[in-house]
Amino acid sequence: MIWDRERYIAHCLFEDTGREMFCELFGPLHILEQEWRAAGVPEDEINMTAFGWDYVRRCGLAGNTGPITDITPKVLSDTPEKTLAIDGRGRRTLLIKSSATIALPLDFPVKTPDDWLKIKHWYAFDEKRIDREMLEKQRKEWENGILTLIGIPGAFDEPRELMGEELLCISCYEEPEMLTDMLETFADTAVKVIERVGEICPIDCLFVHEDMAGRSGPLFGPSQINEFFKPYYSRVWEAAKAYGAKLFSQDSDGDISPILGELIDCGLNCIHPMEPVGGNDIVELRKKYGNKICFKGGIDKHALRFGREAVRKELEYRIAPNLFHGGTVFALDHRIPNGVDIETYRYYVALGREMLGLPQPDMPGWARMAF
């Protein structure tokens, strides 16, 4: 089912719209696509459209809040196994094709505060960040029910892209002024972009990508969230709300539960993918946080590797009564992993629909819901 903007927003804000939402956030891992194709699985199942997933039509608004550099990405070497390249931040990156979809940076442009000052202009505001002609078209799409969203650099993710995780974490203690200056710079530009975008087209959703946690927990604790995240998030969220934004959504893998309360205090009201293997239990977290934050995901993708009984057991637990009637977008907690056979996946889809009381889809379709 294709959800319209108003119904989707209402659902995320805990209004009972008369229907649960069941979707795929990311789709299959590329290795699984290869496995399914080799097994003769039809292409419309590989690309997810055959399953008629729930989704909302959306568009990313034409305002750039991220880095703008004069560096032209280029491939240094490419083999069937790996690709070595220079990316738009000037970093050497390595992609191991057999096991990854995202290239790994081998070096970073910022090691000292002086390095940051040399590239700070990448984040400066310029009217060229705004595509007014495209925004006029997007305004018409919004009027026709399309959800509009605008992304901002992550408070953890963007500094991590500039200096790596280790140096970023050390900088909280040894160079807090540099990190604060980064986030204030991001905020200055994001607010100006939001103001200009919002004058042309309403904003429905503010989105930020962080990926700052693993199985052992987040790399920033509550004190770092309060010191660095909160001033940045709060300022940009207030700007977005002034132009209609109702949702503030974050993507962060791993165990985010130890800092979820602090993130809510920063303004977040929607988060995904809520990986159970990382320690997130959406059933228990709903009991703790009530209607303060919408969960997207939360169903253990790895259960699908172990057959129908494992799938049934997982769904019987995750599809819990306290998650119904708004505030939950039921979905796997990330990409469908390799090793999942198509019959098990079909069973997962059918059983999930049955348990959620959903009708069979009336038309094919799918759109990535990770935003």
Image (cartoon, rainbow, N blue to C red):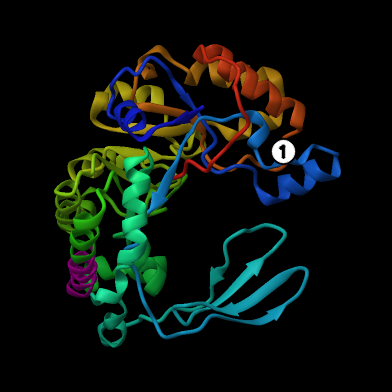
Q: Is residue 72 magenta?
A: no
Q: Quadrant of residue 131?
A: bottom left
Residue 367: % across, % down:
54, 41
Q: Is residue 195 above or below residue 90?
A: above
In the picture, measured across the screen, residue 44 lies left or right of residue 244, that is right
Given residues 247 and 320, the one toward you in this image is 247
Given residues 136 and 77, the one toward you in this image is 136
Residue 224: % across, % down:
23, 56
Q: Quadrant of residue 189?
A: bottom left
Q: Quadrant of residue 231?
A: bottom left
In the picture, measured across the screen, residue 367 lies left or right of residue 34, that is left
Q: Is residue 57 above or below residue 104?
A: above
- Residue drawn at (64%, 29%), measured in percent from left and top? 51
Q: For numbered disc 1, what is the local secondary structure?
A: helix
Q: Is residue 182 magenta?
A: yes
Density class for disc 1 (Cα within 10 Å; few <14, some 14-19, many ≥20) is few
- Residue drawn at (36%, 55%), measured in percent from left and top? 137
In the picture, measured across the screen, residue 325 lies left or right of residue 125, that is right
Q: Which residue is mark 1?
A: 44
In the picture, measured across the screen, residue 339 lies left or right of residue 206, that is right
Q: Is residue 197 above or below residue 371?
A: below
Residue 43: % across, % down:
75, 41
- Residue drawn at (68%, 57%), measured in percent from left and top? 99
Residue 328: % across, % down:
39, 26
Q: Is residue 321 above or below residue 187?
A: above
Residue 133 in sight: yes
Residue 250 in sight: no
- Residue drawn at (25%, 77%), measured in percent from left and top? 126
Tally the marks: 1
Magenta residues span 176-190
Q: Amino acid at mark 1?
A: Asp
**Magenta part, dominant SS:** helix
